[in-house]
Amino acid sequence: MPTYTAPTRDTRFVVNEVLDLPSYGNLPGFESATPDMIDTVINEAGKFCAEVLAPLNQIGDQEGCTRHADGSVTTPTGFKQAYEQYRESGWGTLAHPEAHGGQGMPHVLGFVVEEFMATSNQAFAMYPGLTNGAISAIVAAGSDKQKETYVPKMVSGEWLGTMNLTEPHCGTDLGLIRTKAEPQADGSYAITGTKIFISSGEHDLTDNIIHLVLAKTPGAPDSSKGISLFIVPKVLVNEDGSLGEKNTLACGSIEHKMGIHGNSTCVMNYDGATGYMVGEENRGLAAMFIMMNAARLGVGIQGLGQAEVSYQNAVNYALDRRQGRALTGPAEPEAKADPIFVHPDVRRMLMDGKAFSEGMRALALWGALQVDLTHKAQTEEERERADMLISLMTPVIKGYGTDKGYAIATDMQQVYGGHGYIQEWGMDQFVRDARIAMIYEGTNGVQAMDLCGRKLARDGGKAIQAFFELVGDEVAAVKGTDLEDIGTALEKALGQQQQATMWFMQNAMQNPNQLGAGAHHYMTMMGIVTIGLMWLKMARVAAEALKGEPEDKAFYEAKLVTARYYADRFLPDCGALRRKIEAGSENLMTLGEEAFATAA
């Protein structure tokens, strides 16, 4: 059976030393984030996820969810009890505003909990996970009455929320949705239609589920400009806040999926269900993006989670499994064979897993800090800069984070050899669960186009220039130091990205296919550079710590070795990616449809 140990030491390093969260204590919400409080949250969250959620992960995969004849759904054994513990402990309230019943802590700590949950049990983590996006949309666009009625109970976890976007014929192109919203005399709307792929669409964890549903009102434009957003509760809420009648909506079926079996991914049927418009008519797309951006960051964390847990188990296996001898001679002559840990190719996979997971953790938490600063930094200029950076980085965190997270999970399965293909070891679940993260909340091709087609050019390229400056400053800081070799490798990779950016500017305007053909390569390149930036930041902190002879000297020494490994093994890929981008779209788009058909 696979195991999980929350990486609390590494997380404390990133939060306390790299991000230096206590130094932001003068900002609203940060004053409570003292070093002692930070350590308590990290350690206790790690303990809860390792001891309560991780043991349920395989159970959820094997049992799945059960839909009953009346449309109700039962979650796997232990999930309901674990959710009660989660709610009673207040983990879901951590980063929400005190005005809505939250604890008002920084998003950075909320992301820590998200990572530990997604790593220990991704399917379970999805139940409360999407609620955060739904809360954000209601807070940003809802009426005071809607906020008062729904948000406090969603923050507390008494009710959970969902996002209902996709329809059988309509995924990314939401302008094609057919779900209708007919206005009623009392100001509500009758929602009719079918939504698919609805994570946590029906379950037994809470008495009510607050569905946020995209639909079109009569006469709305037949495009994305005609979309409105509605709150459609599973159970109607009375004026006094108590639960009333069940709404006319139901789970029609549970999707049969490759992974995340412990989460109830539902087909949801709305049959004149009572709904309440959120924000303005035909402005639902803007509110939807609030949900999507929050969800996309969460999905990036899922990519990290599956890489981390598969890496941990692969390390344990490599230390225990004995096959062959070290190339330089027997490592343990008294034994009949050496642990496979001694073989360079096994080490290659394990080092890739370590370098990505630790680097991606730093990136996710750095991104969370930008979310905090967007709302709470002291000056308007600082708030705008943080918002600009996290908007730019969201598709990278989601897209590259899940692409590479899946690749690491498959490599860690490879470490097991044939045993990795056997279900009892659990590695196949990590691979299967990781695969969905590349698809939902906008496929990674969509993320790449969002990055290259929208984010790069926004405000005259202000955001990407700010990113280049950020990396350049970090490189400049290590000139003439023992870390200059890492800085030079990052500087070269950044140069490749800058050249690719310029190529897009020169070639994509006259032929948009040039942008589309290179977008995924560019997103990958930017992911490599950004995690390289995180490794340089971590190397600087580690080098400084080693000057004082710290107790856990080996921890900091390992950081420096891994930073150099990343610089040697990951950053050079940017040159090949730039050349792929500059190959353009001609050979990609030339062949006619008939050339793809298989001849008899």
Image (cartoon, rainbow, N blue to C red):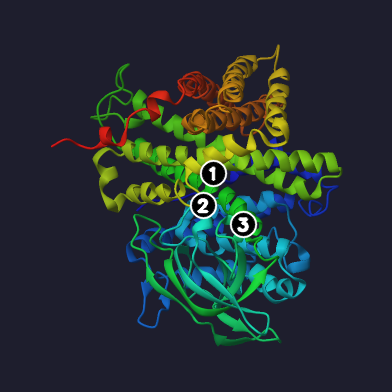
Query: At which x and y percent is residue 507?
Result: 56, 23
Whichever of labels 3 and 2 marks the residue nearer the N terminus, that label is: 3
User: Which of pointers 3 and 2 indicates the residue nearer the eye?
Assistant: 3
Contact check, label 1 and label 2, Cβ < 8 Å: yes
Q: Is residue 39 visible?
A: no
* Residue 388 shown left or right of residue 404 in the figure: right
Give, as a three-letter code, the residue at label 2: Glu
Q: Mark 1 to mark 3: distance in Å? A: 26 Å
User: Which of pointers 1 and 3 indicates the residue nearer the eye?
Assistant: 3
Q: Is residue 116 visible?
A: yes
* Residue 337 shown left or right of residue 10 in the figure: left
Give, as a three-letter code, the residue at label 1: Lys
Please tell me the numbered disc located at residue 441: 2
Give, as a three-letter code, the residue at label 3: Lys
Q: Secondary structure at mark 2?
A: loop
Q: Secondary structure at mark 1?
A: helix
Q: Residue furthest top?
A: 480
- Bin the neighbour count of mark 2 within 10 Å (Cα to Cα): few under 14, some 14-19, many 20 and up: many
Q: Is residue 150 above or below residue 352?
A: below
- Bin the neighbour count of mark 1 within 10 Å (Cα to Cα): few under 14, some 14-19, many 20 and up: many
Q: Which residue is mark 1?
A: 398
Please tell me the numbered disc located at residue 225: 3
* Residue 553 shown left or right of residue 202 in the figure: right
Q: Is residue 137 above or below residue 488?
A: below
